[in-house]
Amino acid sequence: MKKLSVVFCATPEIANNCLVFLNECQGVDLKLAVSMPDRPAGRGKELRSPAVISKAKELGIDTFQSENLNKDEAFKKWRSENQVDLFIVFAFAQFLGKSILEYPKIGCFNIHTSLLPKYRGAAPMQYALFNGDTETGICIQKMVSKMDAGDIALDIKVPIHEHDNLGTLHDQFQSIAPNLLENFISQVQSDSVVLTKQDESKISFAPSIPKEKTVLNFLNNNSKDLLNLIRGISPIPAAYCFLNNKRLKVFEGELSEVNLKPGETSVSFNSLLIGTKEGALRLKTVQIEGKGKCKDNELLNGLKNSFDNFTLTSTKEKK
């Protein structure tokens, strides 16, 4: 059977296992790993390659980095010199224009971390958690010029448990995605791919998350919604508030039955509690600026000698 010539477009670490699979698959000739340019990162702001590029170089795969693949003259030249059957795209962070979508013989296919048409956009895992969903999934869809609107080739459902957060879902999808991709490649090779149109009446969106969305607003939101917000962006970038005017990242929360007014704080039973618009919330795993991640009781024990009162606020108070 003739090998499929493939270009893989991706950026973050969640896509690395798919890259490894394509590199090792006997039915695939992986031509190129494509990603974003290197970015300054860390306190030293040193240039750092996207995770997919670092992994590709480790595996000896040819790489290409571009801010805008559609307009990149070097990539246009590469396309003119190479025939490709498939583009596989996974969290690439760029839209592909018509000329690229029509370039591969079979097409461009995107791995998306939701059950489309639910949660089209950049942050499907986060919004599934924000909304308290008990089920999500991953799918492979044929790309068209409209965002995440193409026909579905394959999908698989994934349950969301109470303990799940963005980190645990990320790890599940990173593990599951190569298996789904393997099934898809097999179907392509056997010419048995069946495409199913999306139900346009069930569309919802999951746009990129603005910074202000990560703030815990205890006066305007109830405890359950805030708990889901914490889950949806833990561990990165993490929801936050301010404890005695110091930024406090919150990685894990827990609903509490303690009766507190909105914005009222309590350290009962050595737990860090806050009243919300409806119900109370324990901030269970936290990190105050300048310190490491810890449990709330550890934080409180460390602060008792230096703070007389514990005040949690959504914004930093001006002195």
Image (spheres, rainbow, N blue to C red):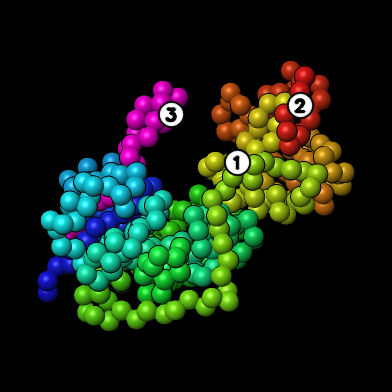
Q: For mark 2, does the 10 Å Cα neighbourhood hold few (<14), some (14 to 19), or many (20 or more) residues?
A: few
Residue at mark 2: 317
Q: Left or right: where does residue 21 sit relative to residue 246?
A: left
- For the residues labelled 2 and 3, the Cα–Cα distance comes to 28 Å
182 in relation to 7, above or below: below
| Residue 133 shown left or right of residue 144 in the figure | right
Q: Residue at x 56, y 62 (%)?
A: 205
Disc 2 residue type? Glu
Tell whether 241 sits left or right of 234.
Answer: right
The count of marks equals 3
Amino acid, disc 1: Lys
| Mark 2 secondary-structure assignment | loop
Classify 314 as above or below 178: above
Can you tell which quarter of the image residue 42 is in? top left
The residue at which mark 1 appears reads as 211
Q: Magenta stretch?
A: 29-50
Report the residue marked by disc 3. 42
Identify the secondary structure beneath mark 1.
Answer: helix
